[in-house]
Image (cartoon, rainbow, N blue to C red):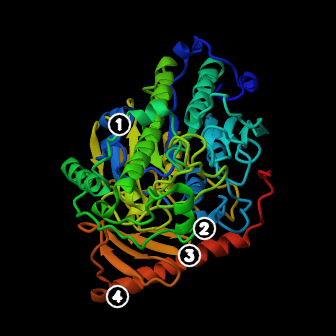
Amino acid sequence: MKIDRRQFLKIGAAGAVSTMAADRKARKPNILVILADDMGYSDAGCYGGDIETPNLDRLAANGLRFTQAYSTARCGPSRGCILTGYYAQQTAGDVMTPGNIPAWTKFVPEYLKPLGYRSYHSGKWHIRFKPLAGARFDHSYTLLDQNRFFTPTAHLLDDERLRAVKKGDGYYATIAIADHAVKTLQQHAREYAGDPFFHYLAFTSPHFPLQALQEDIDKYHDRFSEGWDTSRERRWQRMRRMGLINCGLSPLEPDMRPQWNTPDQELMEKIGAGEVTRAVPWSTLTAEQKKLQRVKMAIHAAMITRMDHEIGRVVDQLKAMDAYRDTVILFISDNGASSEQLIRADGHDASAAPGSAATHLCLGSGWASAANAPFRLHKSWVHEGGISSPLIAHWPNGITDHGKLRHNPCHFIDLLPTMMELGGGKPLQTDASAPPLAGKSLVKAFAKDGAVQRDFLYFNHSNNRAIRMGDWKLVAAGKTGPWALHDLRSDRTEGKDLSSSQPARVAEMSALWTSKDEEFVRVREAAPASSKEKLR
């Protein structure tokens, strides 16, 4: 069983493509946004990685790869940016940003519906409103339980609770999410072939816990036995050859770990002597540690390869319904790979097969440093390793510059303006008190690198702060951490702090960051709170 089949009847079973497709009018492009969870910048093969991602690689070979796309460093804020077109601090639209959601906040379906689009969602959510009643999607499979890939206890179909999945049901989250996407697209082809669609396909892979199908884990048996130092080095070299980067390789930083990690002693007691809680040189590990650590990376890789396979199934459905060439596909990851090491939900059974439902392993900072190579740090930090995202743009009918790179700095706030331009509309606010959308359309960048200009990009997560102006980036770790200034033209690994030699630039950029941070909160708090129906 994937998802409860009986409850899928309301959105229809598989069927033949409607004959309306042959007669449909000149179409606005469909839009498919695919979001990975905690996938590192260099995990995919097309971004220099050593994980098998043939479907993503094909999309990249026939589309574009953006080299300087940014997330917010965390799952909730990133999803808020994607779905609202604002920085998370402007809307508090996600579950990780405090404060009320302003009444003027709208979501992608509300912008696209007047342009004739139907909107669908499959997968992770992390937004306070219900997908249909609050965000106005037409159909949604919402996976609320991110602690279990095989037996989730909380998930919704069209805002209605489904029963908890039981052991032995044959459920795996990545497959179930793709199943819903395929079935929803089949229904769209049958009943709404004349209308364009927006599909938000939000996988939970490869977020912890590391849980994967054994057949997928077996593909990577001993693949990573050389360790994270060698993996980082090889990724860095491949990325330089591919033209993705022109910088050096950041050093490992053993002391930089999330403060909320499960205490080291508890991890070692529950997982065993093979666990490693620091990004230390691979050569310093014991044989037992090396054995478990390479298995953990194999599971991480297996989760990504399975996600890639399921993306291939969705792409095959687009082809089957004659929508492939008309569909803009955008692939991103919500933040960098995670150095979090936590034990939640059902706990960890050290005697069970690693990666099975009874285990709760996390990637850890050593392999996260490889997944984010060549950049510094990980998820939750706003250094490049935490916020750099792959961005693949694929559109057979609109992108002719196949296999090329785009070095335009861009951000998840840009996706909604991009979708609006693709749909032929402008994102006008119905509420005069609403600020303009924070992002810029990337459509011009589909044709020419550097075609989209901007004044700044702002970052703030858990008091980790940054602002980018042109090629200059000002960044600080923690509420009291000092500002460091970097020239990203040659130093995206943020190794050379130029703040002492350029105090005027630091003063200008820090003042702008403070001004925007205060403005975003002030405007949000001045607005009436939204009355849309929230998740309970």
Give the residue type that dot 1 points to.
Answer: Glu
Label 4 or label 2, whichever lies nearer to me, is: 2
Q: In this view of the protein, which residue sits in the foreground, 420 or 144?
A: 144
Residue shown at the point (41%, 79%) measured from the top left: 509
Which numbered mark, 1 or 4, is in the foreground of this view?
1
Report, in whole angstroms, how far the alpha carbon at label 4 lies from the one at label 3. Answer: 20 Å
Q: SS at mark 4?
A: helix
> How far is disc 4 from disc 2 in space, using C-alphas?
27 Å
Is 74 drawn above or below residue 31 in the view shown? below
Considering only order in the chain, which callout, 3 or 4, is on the residue closer to the N terminus?
Answer: 4
Query: In the rendered view, would you say 465 is above or below 159?
Result: below
Residue that label 1 marks: 52
Amino acid identity at mark 4? Ala
Q: Amino acid at mark 3?
A: Asp
* Left or right, 485 with reference to 428: left
197, above or below 332, in the image: above
Residue 119 in percent (x, y) is at 63, 36
Question: In the picture, which quadrant includes the N terminus?
Answer: top right
In primary-sequence order, the first of circles 4 and 2 is 2
User: Label 1 vs label 3: CA separation?
Assistant: 40 Å
The circle on residue 504 is 4
**Secondary-structure class at tag 2:** helix
Real-space CA distance between mark 2 and mark 1, rounded to the nearest whole angstrom: 36 Å
The CA span between labels 2 and 3 is 8 Å
Of labels 2 and 1, the one closer to you: 1
Judge depth for marks 1 and 3 and give the one in front: 1
Q: Splitting the image into 4 quarters, where does residue 308 fall?
A: top left
Q: Which label was assigned to residue 89?
A: 2
Mark 1 in CB contact with mark 3 (< 8 angstroms): no
Q: Earlier in the sequence, mark 2 or mark 3?
A: 2
